[in-house]
Amino acid sequence: MGSIQVAEAEEQDTHTVFVAVGNNIHKTQQLLHWASHNFPSKSICLLHVHHPHPIDSSPDRNPYRDETRSHSFLDNESKKIHELLDQYVATLVQTGVRAHKLLIEMDNIEKGIMEAIAQHNIRLLVIGAAADRYNLGKLAEQESTKIIPVHKQAVPSCNIWFICNGNIKCTRVDSKRTPEIETAPPLLVHNSNAEAEQSQKFEYESIPNGLEHLDSDDVEEIETVSSHSSLRSKWSSISVADSSKLSGLLFCEEEVDGEIEDKSEINGRLEESTRDSKSMRRKEFEEALKQWKVKESSLEDEALEMESLCAKEKNKRREVEEQLAREKEELQKTRNQQDEIMYELQTVQEQNSALANQLCETQEAAKELEEKILSAVDLLISFKEKRDRLQIECANAVRQVRVLREFGKSHTSFSYAVEFPVFSFMEINQATNDFDPSWKIGEGRYGSVYKGVLHNMHVAIKMLPSYGCHSQLEFERQVAVLSRVRHRNLLTLIGTCAESRSLVYEYLNNGSLEGHLARKEKSPLPWQIRISVAADICSALIFLHSSEPSIIHGNLKASKVLLDANFVAKLADIGIHGLVEKNVDSADTTTTHNKPNESLAYVDPEYLATGKFTPESDVYSFGILLLQLLTGRPLLGLVRDVKCALEKDNLEAVLDFSAGEWPLDQTIHLAYLALRCCDKTWLNRPDLTSDIWDVLEPFRTTCMNMPPYLTSKKHRRTPSHFVCPIVQEVMEDPYIAADGFTYEAEAIREWLDSGHDTSPMTNLKLEHTNLVPNYALHNAIQEWQQLQ
Ligand SMILES: Nc1ncnc2c1ncn2[C@@H]1O[C@H](COP(=O)(O)OP(=O)(O)OP(=O)(O)O)[C@@H](O)[C@H]1O
C-alpha cells in the first residue's frame, strides 16, 4: 500500500489535463466530457486512485491458500480497474482525444491524488465535485514537507477543477501555501476552443481555507456556498472578451483594490446576473444533456456494433479453434507416423548391424576358404607334379615291359615249352591222392582247391568247373599269359592241366588272411604283420593295374590273400575270371561260401550298378580289407562303425588290440585312408600309388625297425623247401627236375652231367633230363633273404 503504479503516464506538464476518475461511469463520463471540451488542445490522463480491499489477516488462516487467493483477488481487481480505465480511454479516443491512464494504489484517495500531483508534476487536474470533500488543501499542507522538496522548483502549483453537473470550483494547490479554491462558472460543452483557452488564462487566486469544503454534488449547493460565504471574500466578475458567456465564472478574491460600490446595487446586479446566468446555464445544460444523450445513443449503437463484432470474433475464434483442433489432430497423426517410422528405422538399424556382423563373419569365412583354396591349389600342384613323375615312371616301365615282351616273344617256343609245366590228369589225380576229400582245403565259386604233392613239391590245385566255355587251346593260351604275370605278392602259378582244367599253384602253408583274422590260427596277427600284409596287397594291385593290358582282380577279399611261411602276402586267383564262363564269373554271392552276405561287402557298389569292373573296384575291396586288418571285426557294418569311431575321435573303440599297441597317429591316418577307399563314388577313392602306397610303404619300414615279430627266431628259421636236397644249402637258382623236386641248378646239372639218369631223391629213373626253373621258389627265397 502506498505505492504508486504508473501505467501509461510519463512526466506531465501543462499540456496534459489529469482527470481523477472513479468507478461511477456516469459521473466519470461527465467529467471526461467536460475536460475534453474545455481543454481541447490538451491530452487527457485518467488518474485513478485505487483503494484495495483489505485482506483478512486472522492468525488461523491458511497462509499459502490465502496468499494465492489474495493474489488472484488483487489481480482480478486490478484487471477490472484497467478494463474500466480502458473503457474511458476508448471513449476519449473515439472522440479524437489523446488519452492515458495513471493508476495509483493507496489506502487514502486524497493522499493518492496528492502523491500523484507531486510525483507526476501535475499542473492541471479535474476532479468530480464530491472529491473536494477530500480536503486536498489540508493534505497538501501536511504532505508539503514530502512533496515540496521534490517539486517545489519544477512544480510550484497545481490547478484543480471540481466539477459537478456543469458547475466548477477551481482550486490551486500550492506547494508553498495552503490550497486556494475558487468557484468558477462552468465551462460548457459548447464552449469554443478559444473560450476554453481563455478560461485557462484566468488568474487564480487563493481563497480561504473554509471554502475547501464545498458540497460538490449539486450546483445549487455550490452556488449557495459561494454566495453566502461568510468569509471576507468577494465575488467579482472578471472582465473577459465575452462576458455574457463567462458570466457564470466567478472569482474569489482575497483582496479588492479600489473603492467598494454600493452593496445593494451590487446585490441587485448580482441577483439579476445570477438569474440570467441560471437560465442560461439551464439552457446550456439541457442542450449539453441532449448532446450527451445523442452521444450516449451513438455509443450504445457502437456498443451494439461492438457486440456483433465480438460475436463475429467469437465465431471466428471458434472456427480458428476448430481448425486448431484439426491441425492438432493432424499433428498427432504425424507424430504417431513419425514414431512408427522411428521404430522401423530402429529395427532397420538393428537389422543392419546384424547383417554387418554376418557380413564380417562371412568375410572371415571367405578368407579362411580362400586360404584353404590356396593350400588346396598348392596340394594340387604338388599332386600334378607327382602324377607327371609317375606318368614318366609308368611310361618307362611300359617301355621296359615292351622290351621284355619282345624278348619273351623271341623265346616263346622255348619258354612256354620248357618253363611252364603242363601236368597230366594222372599227375593231378596222384597229387591229390585221388581227390581225397580230406586233402580239400577249400571250395569257392571257381571250383575246389586241393592240397597236393606234385613232383615232391607242395602245391595247391584248383579244379576249375568243367563247364568252362573255353577250348583247350584257348585255356592253355590264357594260362600261359597268366603264368607270365609274376610278382612277389602274387600267388605263383606253377603249372596247369588242361585236361582237368586245373591250375597248380605254389602252396602257402600259413593259410589265408581270412583264416588269421577269424582267429582260426593259434595266435592273432601282430599289427606289424598286418601293415606289411596291407602293403603287400597294395603292391600287388599296383602291379596288376599297371600291367599292359591292365589286370583287374575283381574278387579281392581276405580268402584271396594267402600268407607264406614268412607272412608275406600273396594274392590268389589272378585273372581267373577270364578262364571261366561269363555267367559264372560275377561278383555275386552265389558261392559255396558260408557267408555270402559278407562277400558282398567287398564288392564295389559301382560294379553292382554298372556290372563293370574298374581298377577302382579293387581299391574299394582293398579299403574293406584294410579295415578288417585294423579292426578284425565282421564285415557287416564295418565301414559305418569305423566312420562313427573316427567322428567321435575314438578309433580305439574299434581297433583290434589283439594285434598289439597300434601307433595311433599312423593308424588313424590309415583308417581315414581306408574309409576313402570305401567311398561309394569311385572318383572319390584314393590313388593306390600316390595316396596309399606312399603311406603304407614308410609305415611298413617303420614296423620293420621295431621289435619285430618278423625278426623273431621263429620266423627266421629257413624253410626246408628253400634248401637244395643235394647240397643242403638255400637255393639261389632253383630248378625242377623230372622227379618234381627242386634243386639248385648247378647241383642237379652236375648230377645229370655225371651220368645219373635217376632222381637224387627217389632214386627212380628219370623220364627226361629237362630242367624247369622254379620261379616261385626263386622269388620266395629272394624275398625271404631280403627279410633276414
Ligand atoms: N595256394 C594255396 N595255398 C594255400 N591255401 C590255399 C591256396 N589256394 C587256396 N587256398 C585255400 O583254399 C581256400 C578256397 O579258395 P578259393 O579260391 O577256391 O575259394 P574262396 O576264395 O574261398 O572263394 P571264391 O573263390 O568263391 O571267391 C582259400 O580260402 C584258401 O584257404
Image (cartoon, rainbow, N blue to C red):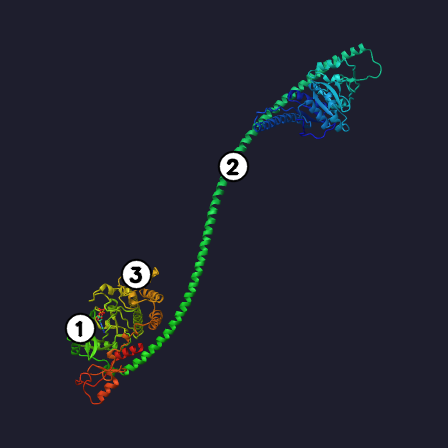
Q: Is residue 249 visible?
A: no
**Mark pair 1, 3: CA separation:** 38 Å
Question: Label 1 belongs to which residue?
Answer: 439
Question: Label 3 belongs to which residue?
Answer: 641
- Marks 2,1: beta carbons within 8 A: no
Q: Quadrant of residue 12?
A: top right
Residue placed furthest toward the front: 713
Q: Can residue 142 be seen in this view?
A: yes
Residue placed furthest toward the top: 264
Q: Where is residue 606 in the image (x, y as percent from the top left)?
A: 29, 65
Q: Identify the residue shown where x is 46% and y is 49%.
A: 350
Is the residue marked by circle 2 packed among few (<14), some (14-19), or many (20+) residues within 10 Å? few
Question: Is residue 642 depicted above or below 749 in this figure?
Answer: above
| Labels 1 and 3: the sequence-earlier one | 1
Q: Quadrant of the N terminus?
A: top right
Q: Label 3 CB, ligand 1: below 8 Å?
A: no
Q: Residue 90 carries which label?
A: none
Q: Quadrant of the C terminus?
A: bottom left
The mark closer to the camera, 2 or 1, is: 1
- Left of 22 or right of it: where is 627? left
Q: Quadrant of residue 200?
A: top right
Q: Position of residue 329 (x, y in %)?
A: 50, 37
Residue type at mark 1: give it. Trp
**Number of numbered markers:** 3
| Labels 3 and 2: the sequence-earlier one | 2
